[in-house]
Image (tube, rainbow, N blue to C red):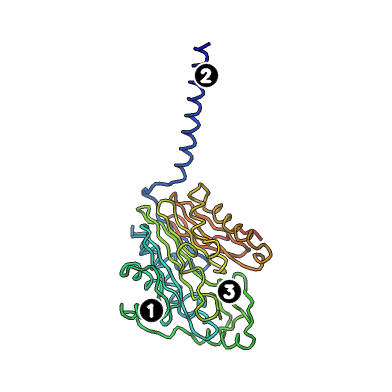
């Protein structure tokens, strides 16, 4: 009897150890090690394709992901035909173009500027905040003073096309968000005419992994068109509009920033990947979190996430149809129509 009992105890403990080992193995599989990987970059919306091409000039030569994402998003920042980011961006309701941006590297270093005026490349100012100050965020006049002290030139960012759109909006001052306006604003109608009464949520978010397996991200925007002066959305908020955890991967968001801030969206996506979810599945769950808060309101908004993990897997998901993101690797260059809930 004692021999039989000893045998059963040994068998049970052995089985328990096997089960525990499998469980630990499954957990460790969600923590992707930093290894040599093929470089990859992805960014939000159709205009991300041109941004990715610039980022690839660095990634394709073995350069650092941080340098790549900064260089990449500077393309739409300087494009006067893109009325959703940087120079040429639609102003706030007072006619002032205010810009937001943030950047984050593989070592949890991050920098951000909010409500910055007169500077064409807020992403580069955000990087200097990260590298030259003990702070994470500079805002308003303080951010402008810092930029000018570091050699940036003061410029008028309000183009004739955007000023015309603002004056047209003033006739009604009506707030009507237009879903997927980012792509529409990149291709304005002849003469720069804008949809009447449009208030818009606008961003380019870019995340990348370099040949050393290190991740970085950048996010930059002119914010919601015709917003209240001083309004800041999710784009320059680390954890909301952008988050990088070099152990897991990176994520960025676009759309109505207030809703992304409420769930700390990009951080949520990265944490879901930490739990073992693939990038697309993690983005979908974040979108569903927004819906669960206010289902009826969610049907009137557009919010999208993109994510990248350390295995080089990527994905995106949105509330509404029409959200696109651009992908560039050594083997492919493409636009992806993200899946959506509605």
Q: CA distance from mark 2 to mark 3?
A: 69 Å
In-front residue for pair 26/312: 26
In this figure, which residue is indicated by the disc labeled 2?
8
**Circle 1 residues within 10 Å: few <14, some 14–19, many ≥20:** some
**Circle 3 residues within 10 Å: few <14, some 14–19, many ≥20:** some
Question: Which residue reaches farthest right?
Answer: 296
Q: Quadrant of the C terminus?
A: bottom right
Q: Give SS at disc 1.
A: helix
In this figure, which residue is indicated by the disc labeled 1?
142
| Residue for point 58% across, 61% down | 337
Sooner in the amino-acid sequence: mark 2 or mark 1: 2
Do the residues bearing badges 2 and 3 touch, measured as CB atoms within 8 Å? no
In-front residue for pair 147/329: 147
Q: Is residue 198 above or below residue 296?
A: below
In this figure, which residue is indicated by the disc labeled 3?
184
Sooner in the amino-acid sequence: mark 2 or mark 3: 2
Q: Give SS at disc 2.
A: helix
Q: Left or right: 65 with respect to 99? A: left
| Residue for point 40% across, 80% down | 119
Q: Quadrant of residue 67?
A: bottom left
**Circle 2 residues within 10 Å: few <14, some 14–19, many ≥20:** few
Q: CA distance from mark 2 to mark 1?
A: 72 Å
Picture coordinates of residue 53, whole percent (x, y): 43, 65
Q: Is residue 327 above or below residue 94?
A: above
Picture coordinates of residue 331, whole percent (x, y): 44, 54
């Amino acid at each position: 009897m004692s021999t039989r009992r000893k045998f059963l105890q040994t068998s049970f403990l052995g089985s328990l150890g096997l089960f525990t080992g499998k469980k630990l193995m499954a957990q460790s599989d969600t923590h992707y090690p930093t290894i040599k990987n093929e470089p990859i970059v992805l960014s939000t919306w159709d205009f991300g394709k041109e941004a990715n091409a610039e980022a690839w000039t660095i990634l394709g030569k073995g350069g650092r992901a941080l340098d790549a994402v900064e260089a990449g998003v500077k393309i739409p920042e300087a494009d006067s035909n893109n009325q959703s980011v940087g120079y040429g961006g639609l102003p706030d309701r007072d006619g002032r173009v205010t810009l937001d941006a943030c950047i984050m590297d593989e070592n949890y270093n991050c920098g951000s500027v909010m409500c910055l005026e007169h500077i064409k490349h807020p992403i580069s100012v955000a990087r200097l905040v990260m590298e030259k100050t003990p702070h994470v965020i500079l805002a308003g006049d303080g951010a402008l003073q810092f930029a000018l002290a570091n050699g940036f030139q003061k410029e008028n960012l309000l183009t004739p096309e955007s000023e015309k759109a603002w004056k047209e909006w003033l006739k009604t001052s009506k707030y009507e968000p237009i879903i997927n306006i980012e792509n529409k604003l990149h291709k304005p109608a002849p003469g720069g005419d804008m949809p009447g009464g449009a208030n818009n949520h606008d961003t380019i978010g870019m995340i990348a992994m370099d040949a050393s397996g290190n991740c970085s991200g950048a996010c930059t925007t002119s914010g919601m068109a015709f917003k209240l002066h001083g309004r800041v959305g999710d784009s320059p908020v680390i954890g909301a509009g952008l988050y990088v955890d070099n152990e897991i991967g990176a994520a960025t968001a676009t759309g109505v920033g207030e809703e992304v801030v409420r769930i700390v969206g990009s951080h949520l996506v990265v944490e879901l990947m930490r739990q073992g979810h693939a990038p697309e599945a993690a983005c979908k769950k974040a979108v569903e979190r927004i819906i669960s808060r206010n289902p009826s309101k969610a049907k009137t908004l557009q919010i999208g996430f993109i994510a990248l993990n350390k295995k080089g897997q990527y994905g995106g998901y949105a509330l509404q149809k029409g959200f696109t993101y651009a992908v560039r690797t050594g083997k492919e260059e493409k636009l992806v129509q993200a899946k959506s809930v509605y």
